[in-house]
Amino acid sequence: MIKFLLSISLVFSLYSSRSQEMSFEEYNPKSTLIVPENPVTRAKFPFVDIHSHQWSMTKEKVASLVEEMDEINMGTMVNLSGRGYNREAGDIGSSEYFTSMVSLVNSEASGRFIVFTNVSFKKFGSKDWTKNAVAALEADVKNGANGLKIYKSLGLRYTDLEGNRIPIDHLDIDPIWAKCGELGIPILIHAADPSQFWLSHDADNERWLELKTHPRRKREEDNPAPFEQIITEQHNIFKKHPKTTFINAHMGWMANDLDRAGKHLDTYPNVNFGIGAVIAEFGRQPRRAKDFFEKYQDRILFGKDAYHKEEFYTYFRVLETEDEYFPYYKKYHAYWRMYGLGLSDKVLKKVYYKNALRIVPNMDKSLFPD
């Protein structure tokens, strides 16, 4: 009997010990909180996704996307990757590729897609780079481009002919920013990465789990430049080109500091915010975030970035409901629970579609109310 009890005790001890050896990644407790839940799978109003990437398109893919867009009430998708990507060349695609992209979406789903073009930084520093880049931009706009997307690679990865990092505010790029203003098209620009990627990868870093699961995202102070230096370069072009409309992707990584975000918009009246990939920041500060959306309701555009239909549900729930303590869809992005802002219909309409209709040319307004 004593041996039996000792065996039971040993088993219990081993089980108890192993239960305490759980990794942070594994710990994901089910909440026992009982509160009203109002999940949203379809937006209250038709919306424009100002930040999407469709690197390649076929008739079948267009049809599939339109079906899903109808399900979630997306009126228009803005494809920022109009030139796609040529893996063989290691660069964005050609003007011919862009034209074929526009032709396809227009013929298969008129009005449902808006296409932005892109700039190639290959051979940057050569004598004719600026002239050729401006000419390519003008040609794409003539062939259906309604905006320009600048990837974060400018400032992070692109280099000139001598291997030097190309700063966002390099003088040779100025004619591009100015030409967009002249042509009346917006520039959606993503600069840098979250500032936490430059911090020590330790217990104080909110992005600890993301950096562990995606170690290539970790950056050192000079890799390739300090966070604040890259962000300052971006702000320099906002200041230098007041007649050009910019959409600062991911709220310029200021969604966790709404005082700074507000000052940014106050300083640069030609700048708007896209909220792609920062919804979790609003969900953990619902009262302050709601005040921010109220105050800057004319400067915020809905967007999600990478397209996954089910992930839109969390955006809708944060913006539309007053639900409490619900999860984000990627733990490594946000391990905290979120709360709904409960935005008014007036603000929702501006964020969902009215601001985009004002900023982006050639949108099909018949897809939206009012």
Image (tube, rainbow, N blue to C red):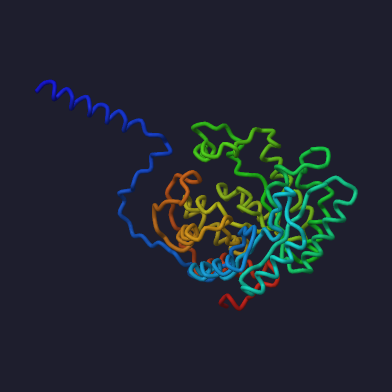
The quadrant where residue 355 appears? bottom right
**Residue 2 coordinates in the image, percent (x, y):** 11, 21
Residue with the most extreme right position: 127
Residue shown at 77% from the left, 61% from the top: 95
Q: Is residue 235 visible?
A: no
Relative to 196, residue 135 above or below: below
**Residue 45 coordinates in the image, percent (x, y):** 51, 71
Residue 346 shown left or right of residue 2 in the figure: right
Comparing 351 with 48, the one in front is 48
**Residue 288 coordinates in the image, percent (x, y):** 51, 53
Residue 340 shown left or right of residue 84 in the figure: left
**Residue 202 coordinates in the image, percent (x, y):** 52, 31
Residue 180 shown left or right of residue 62 in the figure: right
Q: Which image quadrant: the N terminus?
A: top left
Count the marks: how many? 0
Residue shown at 72% from the left, 66% from the top: 100
Residue with the most extreme left position: 1
Residue shown at 77% from the left, 43% from the top: 166
Residue shown at 54% from the left, 38% from the top: 211
